[in-house]
Image (cartoon, rainbow, N blue to C red):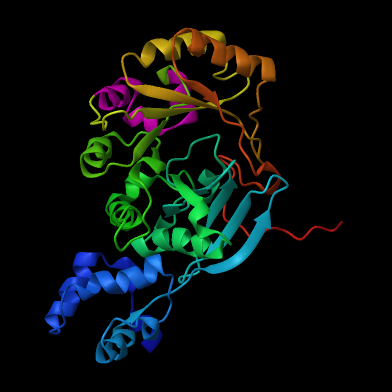
């Protein structure tokens, strides 16, 4: 192991963990907050820049810690302004993050794992299989680095954990990252209501997540009957709709908040008006909204996007049942950055 590799990635440490390390060396634990503020609020990459830290401490820290950035292996820009970052990790793995422009802000789609084990049939990431969980610092670096890359960093206000991986399958590292992400004192300062974590339905972790975090929950549903959902999402065989929706009914929602159900509309599979009526019955009496996402085609898939009339008819059934049902037209399709299209490969050069 090289001297560089022996130093700890400081982004993997919580405020308390860093405080304990300092206290063990006779340094006031409150200095941890000052150090993290330099890293996350002021985007500094060198301990030497931390002017309110004693000089001897500034000299000690780089002997044990480093403040790394992710390697940008590729950056693609869509015609609609979406940007897809391919990041290389220190062990040779790679992940993708997607920056999505909205009317007056940006939303960042964050990855929680390299690859994914859920094997959902409509998702390109599934073809990569699960390679490993991301460490807290690797999750945080996606946000920290892309925020630092923006001319107006304050415009990045929303985060969605809908990139590569099942976030709740990497529970401890996810929670550690979220603590820094939502820390308005020394962390990245995102409002909890503007951070959304999406799950394929990992029921045992859902209630733990609700009890330990105030960020928003989205559930990838995609079917209103067990046969169809099991065909699309193998996790349904372990946690069928009855079990999943019972967990949603018991989920500890903060006041004024709702669970988001994501429903990818696939031609001839789950897009009939009867599917919509069945979905409306299933979701009672859960406090929720429904995001309808027309399928985004990708290589190797036989699924197709429904017609616009079919999409609108499906939405109309839910609206008549008094649900909030929003059609989400995914951005970044021309660079394979849309929902279900992430795979973390270096883009091929065009011959044109």
Q: Tell me the residue at 35%/81% (across/down).
A: 50
In the picture, the quarter occupied by the C terminus is bottom right
Whether residue 3 is visible here, answered yes or no, is yes
Residue placed at 16% from the left, 74% from the top? 29
Q: Is residue 243 left or right of residue 291?
A: left
Task: Point out the stretch of residues depicted in magenta.
Answer: 227-249
Question: On screen, 117 above or below 70?
Answer: above
Residue pushed farthest right? 352
- Exactly how many numbered labels are in the figure? 0
Q: Is residue 304 left or right of residue 164?
A: right
Q: Nearer the viewer, residue 136 or 187?
A: 187
Q: In the displayed structure, does residue 121 sit left or right of residue 310?
A: left
Image position, residue 86 (x, y; %): 58, 60
Residue 3 vertical placement versus 190 (above, below)? below
Q: Nearer the viewer, residue 351 or 192?
A: 192
Q: Main secondary structure of the magenta part?
A: helix
Quadrant of the frame with the N terminus: bottom left
Report which quarter residue 150 is drawn in: bottom right
């Amino acid at each position: 192991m090289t001297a560089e590799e022996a130093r700890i990635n400081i982004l993997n440490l919580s405020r308390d963990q860093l405080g304990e390390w300092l206290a063990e060396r006779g340094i006031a634990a409150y200095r941890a907050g000052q150090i993290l503020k330099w890293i996350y609020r002021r985007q500094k990459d060198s301990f030497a820049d931390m002017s309110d830290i004693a000089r001897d401490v500034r000299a000690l820290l780089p002997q044990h810690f480093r403040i790394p950035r992710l390697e940008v292996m590729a950056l693609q820009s869509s015609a609609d302004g979406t940007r897809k970052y391919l990041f290389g990790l220190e062990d040779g793995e790679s992940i993708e993050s997607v920056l999505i422009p909205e009317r007056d802000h940006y939303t960042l789609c964050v990855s929680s794992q390299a690859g994914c084990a859920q094997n959902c049939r409509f998702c390109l990431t599934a073809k990569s299989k699960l390679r490993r969980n991301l460490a807290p610092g690797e999750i945080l670096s996606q946000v920290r680095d892309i925020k630092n890359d923006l001319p107006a960093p304050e415009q990045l206000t929303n985060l969605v954990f809908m990139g590569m991986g099942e976030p709740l399958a990497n529970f401890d590292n996810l929670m550690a990252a979220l603590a820094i992400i939502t820390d308005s004192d020394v962390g990245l300062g995102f409002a909890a209501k503007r951070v959304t974590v999406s799950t394929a339905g990992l029921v045992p972790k859902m209630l733990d997540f609700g009890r330990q975090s105030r960020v928003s929950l989205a559930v990838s549903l995609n079917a209103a009957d067990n046969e169809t959902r099991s065909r699309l999402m193998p996790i349904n065989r372990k946690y069928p709709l009855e079990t999943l929706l019972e967990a949603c009914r018991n989920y500890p929602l903060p006041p004024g908040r709702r669970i988001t159900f994501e429903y990818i509309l696939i031609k001839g599979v789950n897009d009939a008006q009867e599917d919509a009526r069945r979905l409306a019955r299933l979701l009672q009496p859960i406090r929720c909204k429904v995001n309808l996402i027309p399928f985004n085609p990708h290589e190797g898939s036989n699924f197709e996007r429904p017609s616009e009339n079919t999409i609108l008819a499906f939405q109309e059934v839910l609206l008549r049942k008094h649900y909030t049902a929003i059609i989400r037209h995914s951005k970044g399709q021309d660079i394979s950055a849309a929902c279900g299209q992430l795979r973390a490969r270096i883009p091929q050069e065009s011959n044109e």
